[in-house]
Amino acid sequence: MIYLQLFVVFFRVGLFSIGGGLAAMPLLQVELSRVGWVGHQEFIDMLAVSQATPGSIGINMATYAGYKTASVGGAVVATAGMVAPSLIIILLIARFLKHYQHMSGVRHALGVLRAVSAGMIAAVTWFILAEALGGSGSTGLPLPVDVKAIGMFMVFLAAYWKTNGNPVLFILAGGLAGMAVF
Amino acid sequence: MDGYFSPSKALISVDSPKPFPWKALAELVKVFFHIGLFSIGGGYVMLPLMERELVQVRRWLTAREMANYYAIGQATPGVIAINTATFVGYRQAGVVGGIFATLGMVLPSLICIVAIAGLFQQFEHLLWVQQAFRGIRVTVAVLLVVTLGRMIRALHPTVGRMLLVAVSFVAIAVLHWSPIWIVLAALCLGLFLAWYREGAA
């Protein structure tokens, strides 16, 4: 039964994540905290692991959450659920739409979707800032502030902005710094 | 017992003239497994890698077709790179090809994540692991802030677009609405605007 539930939840997330990249994140966060499969801090840890491993971040997070919930079988089912909507839709388009110019209207619609997507990702970013920089994120505000974390945030923000380096190395450096600082 | 005595004849199917495209499927899985394995850090790494492999090395697609597939991949649910893989698989070997290409693309990350999640469960209670992850959370916040800044810059912000950003931020962070409704509303508004502009032109 847990497999069915996993499939349904991630099918829904996959269906409504339009626009690529981080588009799945807002819905993933809402759905996972609603079902209670993954805690707040764990969500950020998942995000870190997903960014530092091969593949797309949204699908990696689904795999991780599936594994946490129901081991290897759960990981497979969650991944399948996440991929299924787009697989079906793309196969239908490839089969039945010979002239993809029809899509130009949809490309107009994408402008709105991209703006809205940025707003939703801003909301997740706010949540993660509160969790990473505050002592506890339960208030929804980054309070009480964790001075060490904020100092580290400033240094890393300046470094990333300047160097525009590799995110994977950056995450590893964050782990080392965390061991030294906290 | 019949099958045992005449295995080779039984294996050759009589009703379908085309043999099952095992070779094409194995090739698809191989190519997309390779792409999936080396695309660490999400779509921005995947897309250039795919372009080199599919357009320049294997010549399965022209650059123009690739651009079309990206546009469709962006306008449909899911990850652009995986959607492109599904498309290419379909073109090479039909519906089964689409499924196998997708499978090849997803498999490397599935294996990596399961391995890491398994390891993490064994070590998460250790103090130094917890300290490391506190640091990692800070870097994730940094990466997101920078990515968000880039996304907003790429919007070529106008007053209207920034208003949309602000409204959806408030809807999620303050009002706790479901992203599903926001995506649906955005699609309706976008299609209406497209229809309105094309009608006016």
Image (spheres, rainbow, N blue to C red):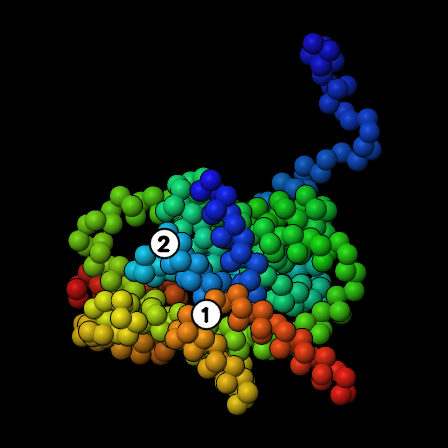
The residues bearing labels 2 and 1 have C-alpha atoms spaced at a distance of: 17 Å
From the top left corner, tell me how far across and down residue A41 is, in percent. Answer: 30, 60
Image quadrant in which you'd find residue B131: bottom left
Q: Residue at x 42, y 47 (%)?
A: A66
The local crowd at label 1, few if under 14, some if 14 to 19, many if 20 or more residues have their Cα within 10 Å, is some
Q: Along the horizontal axis of the image, is A91 left or right of A18?
A: right
The local crowd at label 2, few if under 14, some if 14 to 19, many if 20 or more residues have their Cα within 10 Å, is few
Secondary structure category for the residue under label 1: loop
From the top left corner, tell me how far across and down residue A26 is, in percent. Answer: 45, 66
Q: Is residue A164 visible?
A: no
How many tags in the picture?
A: 2
Residues tagged 2 and 1 counted as in contact (Cβ below 8 A): no
Q: Is residue B1 visible?
A: yes
User: Depth check: B113 or A58 in front?
Assistant: A58
Q: Report which residue position mark 1 lands on.
A: B177
Question: What is the three-letter code of the residue carrying label 1?
Answer: Trp
Secondary structure category for the residue under label 2: loop
Q: Along the horizontal axis of the image, is A57 left or right of B127?
A: right
**Above/below status of A106 relative to B56:** below
User: Depth check: B106 or A130 in front?
Assistant: A130
Q: Residue at x 71, y 74 (%)?
A: A105
Question: What is the three-letter code of the residue carrying label 2?
Answer: Gly
From the top left corner, tell me how far across and down residue B75 is, in percent. Answer: 63, 67
User: Depth check: B193 or B40 in front?
Assistant: B193
Q: Residue at x 77, y 19 (%)?
A: B9
Q: Chain of mark 1?
A: B
**Above/below status of B35 relative to A138:** above
Q: Report which residue position mark 2 lands on.
A: A36
**Above/below status of B181 relative to B3:** below
